[in-house]
Image (cartoon, grey):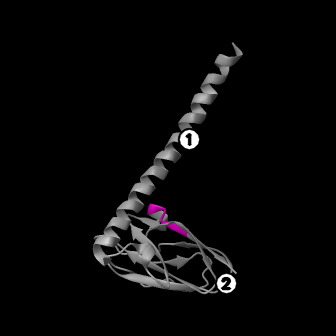
C-alpha cells in the first residue's frame, strides 16, 4: 500500500517537469527559426560574424538568452522579427536603454566590467518575459 501512496506524488513531479521541458523545446525551436531568419537576411550564420557576439531578438525572445563573454567584448543584438521593435536595457541601470531596434536593425553594447549583467527588452520584459543575461569574465 505504501508504494501506491507514492504514485500520486511521482505523477505530480513528472507532470511538473514536462511544462519546463516543453518550454525549453519551444525556445529551442524559436531560436532555430530566428537563426534561419538571420541567415536569410544577412547571408551567413550569426556565429560567423567577426569581432562581436550576436544575440538575436525574435518572437519576444533573446537567442541565446544567456551568453558568456570576456571583458571588452561587444555584443550586438539583432532584431530578426518581421514587425516588432525591441531594445536592450541593463537591469542595473549602468547604461541607458538602447534605442529601439526595428526589424533588420541592431544595437550594440560593449561590456567592460566583470560579472553577471542581467538585461531586458524595455517594451517587452514585463508582458513577454523578454529577459537575458551576459556573464562577463575577466
Tell me which numbered mark, 2 or 1, is placed earlier along the sequence: 1
Q: Residue at horizontal 41%, vertical 62%?
A: 31
Reading the image, the residue beneath label 1 is 17
Q: Nearer the viewer, residue 49 or 113?
A: 49
Query: Would residue 2 be found to the left or right of residue 109 on screen?
Result: right
Q: Nearer the viewer, residue 32 or 26?
A: 32
Q: Which residues are magenta?
A: 128-132
Considering only vertical position in the picture, is 8 above or below 138? above
Q: Position of residue 61 (x, y in %)?
A: 44, 64
Which numbered disc covers residue 113? 2
Q: In the structure shown, which secondary structural element does the residue marked by tag 1 occupy? A: helix
Is 102 magenta? The answer is: no
Q: Position of residue 66 (x, y in %)?
A: 56, 67
Give the number of callouts: 2
Q: Position of residue 45 (x, y in %)?
A: 38, 72
Say which quadrant the N terminus sits in: top right
- Image quadrant where residue 16 sits: top right
Cα distance, mark 2 to mark 1?
36 Å
Say which quadrant the C terminus sits in: bottom right
Q: Nearer the viewer, residue 44 or 125?
A: 44
Whether residue 34 is visible: yes
Query: Would residue 100 be found to the left or right of residue 92 on screen?
Result: left
Mark 2–mark 1 CB contact (< 8 Å) = no
Which numbered disc covers residue 93? none
Considering only vertical position in the picture, is 130 above or below 25? below
Whether residue 123 is visible: no
Q: Residue at horizontal 44%, vertical 56%?
A: 28
- Image quadrant where residue 48 sits: bottom left
Considering only vertical position in the picture, is 58 above or below 72? above
Q: Residue at horizontal 63%, vertical 28%?
A: 9
* Label 1 neighbour load within 10 Å: few <14, some 14-19, many 20+: few
Q: Position of residue 109 (x, y in %)?
A: 52, 85
Amino acid at each position: 500500500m505504501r508504494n501506491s501512496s507514492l504514485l500520486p506524488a511521482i505523477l505530480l513531479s513528472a507532470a511538473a517537469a514536462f511544462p519546463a521541458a516543453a518550454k525549453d523545446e519551444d525556445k529551442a525551436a524559436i531560436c532555430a527559426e530566428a537563426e534561419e531568419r538571420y541567415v536569410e537576411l544577412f547571408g551567413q550564420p550569426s556565429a560567423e560574424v567577426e569581432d562581436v557576439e550576436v544575440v538575436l531578438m525574435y518572437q519576444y525572445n533573446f537567442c541565446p538568452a544567456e551568453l558568456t563573454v570576456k571583458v571588452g567584448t561587444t555584443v550586438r543584438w539583432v532584431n530578426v522579427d518581421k514587425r516588432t521593435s525591441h531594445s536592450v536595457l541593463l537591469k542595473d541601470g549602468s547604461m541607458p536603454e538602447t534605442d529601439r531596434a526595428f526589424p533588420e536593425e541592431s544595437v550594440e553594447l560593449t561590456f567592460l566590467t566583470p560579472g553577471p549583467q542581467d538585461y531586458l527588452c524595455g517594451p517587452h520584459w514585463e508582458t513577454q518575459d523578454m529577459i537575458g543575461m551576459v556573464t562577463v569574465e575577466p
